[in-house]
Amino acid sequence: MGSPAERRGDARELAAQLDADGVRNLALTWVDNAGIARAKAIPAARLEHAAQRGVGMSPVFDVFTSEDAITASDHLGGPAGDLRLFPDLDRVTVLAAQPGWAWAPADRYDQDGTPHPACQRQFARKMTERATAAGLDLRMGFETEWVVTRTPAGHDPAEDDAYEPLDYPCTGPAYGMTRIVELSDYLRDVTEALTLQGIEVHQVHPEYAPGQFEVSCAPGDPVRAADDAVLVRETVRAVSARHGLRASFAPSVVAGAVGNGCHLHLSLNRDGKSLHRTPDAAWGLAPDAVAFLAGVLGALPALLAVGCPSPASYLRLQPSHWAGVYQCWGVENREAALRLIPGAPDDPDGGSAEIKTFDGAANPYLAVGAVIAAGLHGIETAAQLPAPETEDPGTLGVRERARRGIVRLPGTLTEAANRFEKSAPLYEAMGKVLHGAVLAVRRAEEARFAEVDAEEIAAVTRWRW
């Protein structure tokens, strides 16, 4: 975090700049194990104090569910205890769509100044440092999908409108230019706000489902990528509200329809060179890239409990819906759970891989950290990729899938949580406190929705993310 004197000086300068920019309040966010961005806000003038002393919060948030129920793990739960939120001064950002406000992600520490063992952001940083120590430079980025609907006239946010018919503000076909025409002002404001906040937008486009869009942004180091995922989502939410719209990032907005993914892209480099551009190597992958991606592929059943953390996630994970529900990989195969993207032949920095299964309910810090842990385990064990899949596994017969060694990824949160519980690499990487808290929240979500049908699951969770 830097020395106390350095932090005070940096915070004092930042506070003065925020005041000059008309910023009066600063939102500090962390993301809980249910994937909900929680926040505490302080007057911007208090930034120096927050940087020196932190802002108090209860550790009980680590065992909150997506509906704000409180469960418990062996190490966390109940009203006792306190943590300190420390804003990352390097990420303080003036919010373009919320006049008078700025934002910063926060790291969480115990009162004695030691890192909180369940801090997801510090877990992501620790895994990034492990990768760096192994000589890897990882770049990651998220593709964020969301659905917008019109806010009902006279809508009272205190009323439960989960079961009301959705009013979509655009009626054009999937991926159609019509949708951009219908919401051109809205999409312009989304991209402008992101750009003003220092996020480089690569593309924004209509998606498949009614009212659905996607934004892809420039990759960065894993912790920054997770920060950006939070900032992108809250910016889209704020711009939507200013246009009289409501944004949902839920995995399943309407049961039976295509849901919202939040695909994670990653690329590996060593000594300034891409490990996706090795001459004469199969698929262009250097040996460490092969082992890393094989580790991720092998861990996907357990990783689903991180990247697909809600019962609603498994409404989205359906065969032949481009969600990657089979444990296989392929070159530019959008039905494979792990998609290899070679990139343009003349681009020395090109090449990446995409995890198709992850969705918008995931905590992005847990997602990047767990993927790195799985990939490093792959390198440590010299894991190898099987043959790439060139077809849609969902169209193959059961015997043909078995012959090719293709298996279905977990189809329920219970199954994914069981695999997560037994994953030694993820347990070692997370530590018992964080791993136990994640598992406790998954078990609580399972129990809450055990007797609930698909339509109600989608309706109840629609506005949680």
Image (cartoon, rainbow, N blue to C red):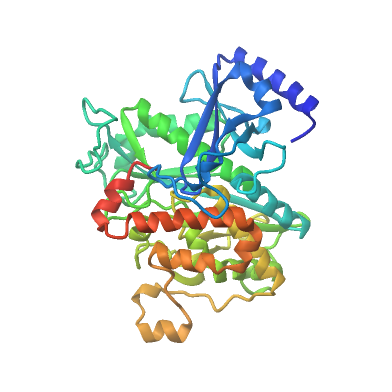
Report x, y in % for residue 13. 71, 19
Residue 187, visible in the rendered structure? yes
Q: Quadrant of residue 137?
A: bottom right
Q: Residue at x 32, y 36 (%)?
A: 181
Viewer-closest of 82 and 100: 82
Q: Residue at x 37, y 60 (%)?
A: 314
Residue 286, visible in the rendered structure? no
Q: Examine the rendered structure and indicate whether residue 426 appears above or below residue 190.
A: below
Viewer-closest of 69 and 326: 69
For the N terminus, the quadrant is top right
Q: Residue at x 69, y 74 (%)?
A: 381
Q: Examine the rendered structure and indicate whether residue 177 appears above or below residue 388.
A: above
Q: Examine the rendered structure and indicate whether residue 38 appears above or below residue 328.
A: above
Report x, y in % for residue 373. 64, 61
Q: Name the side, left or right, on which 330 lies relative to 181.
A: right
Viewer-closest of 76 and 162: 76
